[in-house]
Amino acid sequence: MIKVENLSHSFFVGKKNNRQEVSVLKDINLEVGEGEIVTIVGRSGSGKSTLLNLMSGYIKSTKGDIFIADERVTDYKESIWADFRADHLGFIFQSFQLIPSMNAYQNIELPLVMKGVSEKERKQRVVEMLDKVGLNDYQNHYPSELSGGQQQRVSVARALIVQPPIILADEPTGSLDQETEGELLEFIQQLNRVENITFVIITHDEEVARVADRTIRLEDGRIAADWEVAVR
Ligand SMILES: Nc1ncnc2c1ncn2[C@@H]1O[C@H](COP(=O)(O)OP(=O)(O)OP(=O)(O)O)[C@@H](O)[C@H]1O
């Protein structure tokens, strides 16, 4: 589903006459199979978010290749990436990134509006999704009127509404209490089992790593370990 080949990435920092190259990812090779849940762990600064941003096309790699769903996306221009993301990728973030001036219903509906889906179909899909994430009673609530766990459910619903085969998540449980975290992880596992959605999840949290099929550890921009989780 995702294949990363000999991927390296550097940032350039400092002023023009004193520019320094900071090598952040070094020769990364990995594959994520269809229907896998893979977690990426590693210390702060080891390159996890950079790797996810490269897989999402938000930054361009210095070297190497990325394939997603059999397409070589490495050199896609931003306009092509935007379409590709809309069809293939859903995103979940620690900070939810909901639009504060839109209620839960409107936040979930937004990706469909952007894709040009008709109003009738939008309504049907959003209502179904509200039901799936258990937010029927909260559809008119604005993000500030929802708990952290409810906001994260809205953000998961927004990621799922376009039925992406892959979800990329950056610390999805980072702002949640233990109970809400457990609920989200259960939901992720259910989506994975029932709908065969592939998940790549960055996390610091061992509870999250426990729901994974595989865990990849980054150290100083290199893959230090890639292991299968025995039972889940
Ligand atoms: N835009 C940028 N310009 C320069 N350096 C950057 C930029 N983005 C990230 N870095 C550097 O790249 C390294 C890896 O950062 P990254 O955010 O990928 O790490 P991370 O493993 O996700 O860390 P954390 O767990 O703290 O989120 C860090 O040293 C960071 O300072």
Image (tube, rainbow, N blue to C red):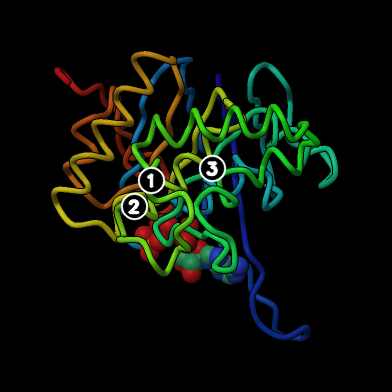
The amino acid type of the residue labelled 1 equals Arg
Q: Which residue is mark 3?
A: 158
CB under 8 Å between discs 1 and 2 = yes
Residue sitting at x 70%, y 78%: 19
Visible residue check, residue 49? yes
Residue sitting at x 48%, y 55%: 140
Q: Which residue is mark 2?
A: 150
Which quarter shows the C terminus?
top left
**Position of residue 117 measured from the top left corner of the image (x, y, whole percent):** 76, 32
The amino acid type of the residue labelled 3 equals Arg
Q: How many other residues sit within 10 Å of disc 2, few (<14), some (14-19) or many (≥20)?
A: some
Measure the C-alpha gap from mark 1 to mark 3: 8 Å
Question: Is the residue indicated by label 3 positioned so its CB lies within 8 Å of ligand 1?
Answer: no
Question: Is the residue indicated by label 2 positioned so its CB lies within 8 Å of ligand 1?
Answer: no
Q: Which residue is mark 1?
A: 153
Q: How many other residues sit within 10 Å of disc 1, few (<14), some (14-19) or many (≥20)?
A: many
Q: Closer to the camera, 121 or 188?
A: 121
Which quarter shows the N terminus?
top right
**Position of residue 103 measured from the top left corner of the image (x, y, whole percent):** 53, 58
The amino acid type of the residue labelled 2 equals Gln
Measure the C-alpha gap from mark 1 to mark 2: 5 Å
Residue sitting at x 36%, y 52%: 171
